Image (cartoon, grey):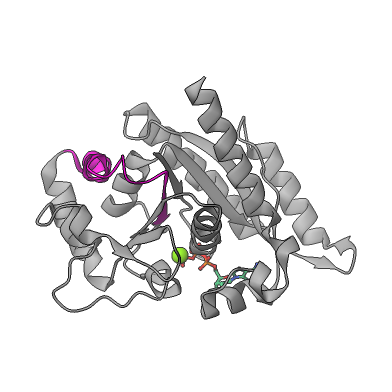
Amino acid sequence: MQTIAAVSLAGGQGKTTTCYFLAKMLAQAGKKVLAIDCDPQANLTFFLNHEVAPDRPTLLEVLKGTVSTEDGIYPTNDENLFLVPADSGLAKVTEYLSGSGTGALILQIRLQAVKELFDYVIIDVQPTRSQICLTAVGAADWVLIPAESATKGVNSLLDTQKFLAEQAQVMAFRGQILGIIPFRDRWVGRTQTLESRDNIAAMREFADDAPVLPTIRESEKFKQATRQGQLLSELGAKDLEYPFEKIIELLEDCKQLNQS
Ligand code: ATP
Ligand code: MG
């Protein structure tokens, strides 16, 4: 089982979008996938069309350990794709995590119980340095950093890299950065806008050893797909799936390297 978290410390950088398409496309390729919504905004839960019923366990109860991890996992409309959902109540877990002393390790510990059941765990992370974010990062073998192709995105990338380095220093992040994904890369016809070009160039400069992955193009199709619970290919926009195809290739390559 490989665990991948989408992390950025600013809002609106493409984390949920990345998790949604990556999880669905991995599942479509026949992998057993567990999506985990580590954000009380619960956008991923909503995109995967899951409605949290009153009194049914969510990530909150899984993290607290009041239910088994399996009891917090629900099927989705996609074969092979399962979800640990969230709702706004997830914010309450902060107290438990900060009081536990090992908050950053809790999600990793909870996932041990299901490691034989899934090939990939995809975690959508809240955009703040919260206890929820710490535990998500603590569970990750790989982090993807989506960053808007704008000044805000470059700043978010720098903050996120700094945060991950700090966490690595105290052994609370033991994974690696799989890559930086420039988000909302804007092209007019066959020409990339100057803003996108310059900001993606800045990302390359600041990337250190992390690869800058193929960009997510600015397009309304992504919103349309998430709203309708569909894949981009189902909307006739298979070309826009390229960044996620590349991530899947990278993950499969890493798996083979680990096994050999
Ligand atoms: P938050 O930090 O609030 O959780 P996020 O990092 O998860 O945000 P998303 O929700 O994935 O970011 O995307 C931010 C916004 O951009 C959303 O309103 C989404 O509909 C929109 N969006 C997604 N993909 C694209 C795209 N390719 N082009 C333009 N807009 C997009
Ligand atoms: Mg989000």
Q: Residue at x 67, y 67 (%)?
A: 233
Position in image of residue 56 (x %, y %): 17, 71
**Which residue appears farthest toward the left when viewing the image?**
66
Q: Residue at x 15, y 56 (%)?
A: 95
Figure check: 86 above or below 51 = above
Figure check: 203 above or below 27 = above
- Span colored in magenta: 102-124
**Which residue appears farthest toward the right when viewing the image?**
190
Does 174 sit left or right of 185 as displayed? left
Q: Which part of the image, by quadrant, shows the N terminus?
A: top left
Q: Residue at x 54, y 64 (%)?
A: 17
**Which residue appears farthest toward the top when viewing the image?**
260
Viewer-closest of 38 and 21: 21
Q: Residue at x 40, y 76 (%)?
A: 49
Viewer-closest of 7 and 76: 76
Does 195 sit left or right of 61 as displayed? right
Figure check: 228 above or below 65 = below
**Can I make out residue 94 in this image?**
no
Viewer-closest of 207 and 47: 47
Position in image of residue 99 (x %, y %): 11, 47
Position in image of residue 237 (x %, y %): 72, 69
Instruction: Specify the quarter for ligand 1.
Output: bottom right
Viewer-closest of 120 and 124: 120
